[in-house]
Amino acid sequence: MTSFAQVLAQFDPSVPFVAPANWQQGRTIFGGISAALSLEAVLRERPQGFPPFKSAQVSFIGPVTQAQTFDTSVLREGRSVTSVSVDCKSGDELALRTTLLFAQPRASRITHEAWGCPLLEEASRYTTLALDSTIAPACAFNFEMRPAGGSRQLCLQ
């Protein structure tokens, strides 16, 4: 089984990427790996770096059925904000389009206290979610999931 860390270590944005079998999800690959590789392609293209990463808009357009290529483009680079797009193609077909935003922190007079992050303990303090291999996609086993800081989802049949 190829871990996420191994995928990143082996990834070269200048070479078409073929996902390992354990990242398959039906006839395509797990979309999160394509989104993560889009960000990685941008970061590797510019070794001098960007301002801190702030947000991503990811559009899943079509299935990944062939090797992926990643085409990055800086849309705008201002004094404090840089916007970058990434087109991920599967063969000749667009599979994913990502817009990434990098921005310097700014001081604000506005204080947001309505939404706080839950206080969490160390990850090892939470129980690992057991997955049912008869219903969970194979790619789900690439993650160690530990529900924390909220209620678990419930599905009734």
Image (tube, rainbow, N blue to C red):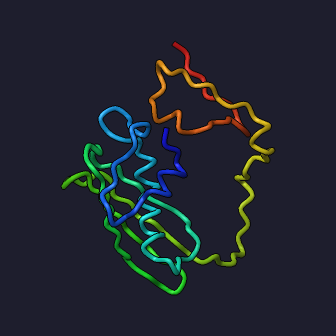
Q: Residue furthest top?
A: 157
Q: Residue at 50% of width from left, 21% of height from top?
A: 133
Judge from the rendering whether residue 16 lies leftward or rightward of residue 106; answer left or right: left
Q: Tell me residue 12's x, y (percent).
A: 39, 63
- The residue at the point 51 percent across, 51 percent down is 6
In the depicted structure, whether residue 95 falls above or below residue 30: below
Task: Please tell me whether residue 90 is drawn above or below residue 83 in the rendered image.
Answer: above
Q: Residue at 45% across / 56% down in the picture?
A: 10
Residue 45 image point, x, y percent: 42, 73
Q: Nearer the viewer, residue 150 or 69?
A: 69
Residue 87, placed above or below residue 139:
below
Q: Nearer the viewer, residue 62 or 109?
A: 62
Q: Nearer the viewer, residue 130 or 51?
A: 130
> Measured from the top left, where is residue 26 in percent x and y?
34, 32
Q: Identify the residue at the far bottom of this view.
A: 79
Q: Quadrant of residue 27?
A: top left
Number of disc labels = 0
Residue 117 is situated, as x and y percent measured from the top left of the image, at 72, 51
Is 129 rendered above or below residue 40? above
